[in-house]
Image (cartoon, rainbow, N blue to C red):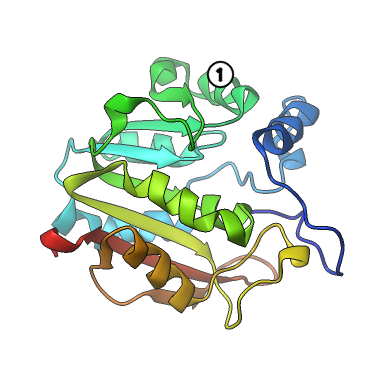
Amino acid sequence: MDGGFAMTSPAAPVDTTTEFFETIYADATGDASRVPWADERPHPALVRWLDVVAPSLIRCGGRVVVVGCGLGHDVQELHRRGYDVIGFDCSATAIDWARRIDPERAESYVHADLFDLPPGWTHRFDLVVEINTIQALGPDRRPEAMAAIAALVGRVGHLLVICRGDDVPAAPELGPPWPLTPTELLDLAAGVGLSPTGPIADFMDDEDPPVRRLRAAFAREAAT
C-alpha cells in the first residue's frame, strides 16, 4: 500500500508538504494501520529486485540511502542483506517511530528534507532507493524532486525507482498519489543525466485490488 488517501473525484489539489506527512504520522499515534502507505514489510518489488538484479550492480557492503524511508522496513531489509544503509524522512515522527522499531540501528534513520539534504551526501551513495516519493509530490514538483534524488547518486552509482504507473499523465486534482507514465519517468531521469540500465518493469502488484507499478534502475550516462 502506498497511499490510500488517493482521491476518486476532482477536488482542490492537495499540497503534500512536510507538514502534510508529519501530520499523518503524528495523528497515527503509533498505529501503523492509520498510515495509508505503511505495510510494515519491505516493498515486494524492492525485494524481488534485490534478489535478482542488485547482486550484479551493487557490491555487498555498498552505501545505500532510502528516500522517504517512513517506518524503515526497506532500510531493515537492506541491512539484512549486508548493505551500509541509511534512510531519511521529512517527518520527525516517522524517524522516531522507525528508531523505536529498530533500536539497534537507530543511527541509520535520519530526519532530513529531500530539498535540503546534508552537503556531505552529494554523490555519496552506490545505490539510491526511491519508492513512492515522487508519486506523492505534485507533478509540478517532480523535476525538483528528481534532481535532489539524483544528487545522491555516486559517480558510478545507481538509482532504483518504484512508483505507481499509468498510461496517461495524472491530473493534479486526482492525487495524491500521482502515478507516472513510463515516458514521464524516463524523461525525469534524462533531465538529470540518468539513463536506464534496462527496460522498465511494468506490472500489477499483489495488492487487493492489484495496482500497476513501474520499476526501473538508472545510472549516470557516463557510467552506462
List x then y, in percent, for residue 198. 25, 73
* Relative image position of residue 17 (x, y in whole percent): 67, 40
- Residue in the foreground of this view, choosing between 45 and 117: 117
For label 1, the crowd category at 10 Å Cα-Cα, with few meaning under 14, some 14 to 19 and many 20 or more, is few
Q: Is residue 168 above or below residue 143?
A: below
Q: In what quadrant of the picture does the C terminus appear?
A: bottom left
Q: Residue visible at 49% across and 27% down?
A: 112
Q: Where is residue 51 in the image (x, y as percent from the top left)?
A: 29, 57
Q: Name the residue under label 1.
A: 100
Q: Which amino acid does label 1 sit on?
A: Arg
Residue drawn at (68%, 37%) of the image: 21
The quarter holding residue 135 reads: bottom right
Depth check: give the residue in front, 140 or 176.
140
At horizontal 61% and vertical 81% (from top left) the residue drawn is 168
From the viewer's perspective, tell me whether residue 1 is left or right of residue 153.
right
Dot 1 lies on which element? helix
Residue 165: quarter of image: bottom right
